[in-house]
Amino acid sequence: MKQALYIDCCVRGAASRTRRLADAFFAALGKDWQVTRLDLTQEELRPLCGAYFEERESLLREGRTDHPRFDRAHRLAEAELVVVAAPFWDMSFPALLKLYIENVSVEGITFRSTAEGLKGLCRAERCVFLTSRGGAYPDGDPMEQAVPYLRAIQRFFGIGGLDVIAADGLDLDGADVNAITAAACERAAALARAL
Ligand SMILES: Cc1cc2nc3c(=O)[nH]c(=O)nc-3n(C[C@H](O)[C@H](O)[C@H](O)COP(=O)(O)O)c2cc1C
């Protein structure tokens, strides 16, 4: 079985429109994929600060990348497909997802330094980003900072490419939320079938 890691940052749970995209994606994904879901709302992620930061620095100085606090980074590095589902918040995504990224950015696991620069160590060929947004943001709109940031992280970790499926404009006056979400779900399902 091929291994997929589903990073679920749908803070509103069952009420989340982003979650609907993720459900459509995984319903269409081939049965040869084994999916591990990481529910970030249940992960008790901590910011790198104070003693928690110092512990990480001393573990890495000692080369102890096998410490349990790095388990999430190993799971990300080993996954063959990474799927991130997160709503658009404050021009990017919830802080919970940034906390996850901060905790899995570990030298020797998800990236390493070389004389030529940083080299990503993750195995996945693709990262899929599923999102929904209150406003509408055409590709490249500078007000949309989730996609550019995740594209940088995808390259940093050595993941081959980033596919983005967004349900846009859901909170605009008169938006047909069901139609917009259904169309995005269909695009998510089509992407999953192509993987
Ligand atoms: C805390 C919070 C921050 C948000 N920030 C923005 C924003 O900056 N721009 C925007 O267009 N919509 C914003 N929204 C609206 C959401 O992007 C939109 O409702 C989205 O569909 C929520 O996804 P969900 O249904 O998966 O929770 C925000 C919503 C919340 C709850």
Image (spheres, rainbow, N blue to C red):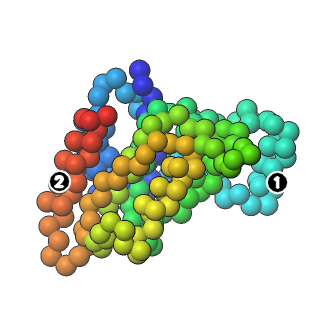
131 to the left or right of 158: left
- Three-letter amino acid code at the position of disc 2: Ala
- Which residue occupies 63% across, 44% down? 119
Percent x, y of residue 109: 66, 38
- Gap between marks 2 and 1, in whole Å? 46 Å
Classify mark 1: helix, strand or loop: helix
Q: Residue at x 74, y 36 (%)?
A: 65
Could you say whether the residue bearing mark 2 is in a helix, strand or loop?
A: helix
Tag of residue 182: 2
Q: What amino acid type is highlighted by mark number 1?
A: Glu
Task: Please determine whether, in this image, residue 123 is positioned above or below residue 42.
Answer: above
Residue that mark 1 sits on: 54
Residue ID at (19%, 47%): 186
In which image quadrant can residue 27 be found?
top left
Taking the image as shown, residue 171 lies to the left or right of residue 65, namely: left
Closer to the camera in the image, 94 or 121 = 121
Q: Residue furthest front?
A: 116
Q: Residues within 10 Å of mark 2 (few under 14, many from 20)?
A: some
> Which quadrant is home to the C terminus?
top left
**Placement of the N terminus among the 4 image quadrants:** top left
Q: Are marks 2 and 1 in contact (CB under 8 Å)?
A: no
* Quadrant housing residue 70: top right
- Of residues 118 and 186, the one nearer the viewer is 118
Residue 98 screen position, x and y as percent: 56, 59
Q: Is residue 194 above or below residue 20?
A: above
In the rendered image, residue 94, in percent from the top left (x then y), is placed at 48, 63
Judging depth in this view, the residue of 95 and 149 nearest the camera is: 149
Question: Mark 2 or mark 1, which has the lower sequence index?
Answer: 1
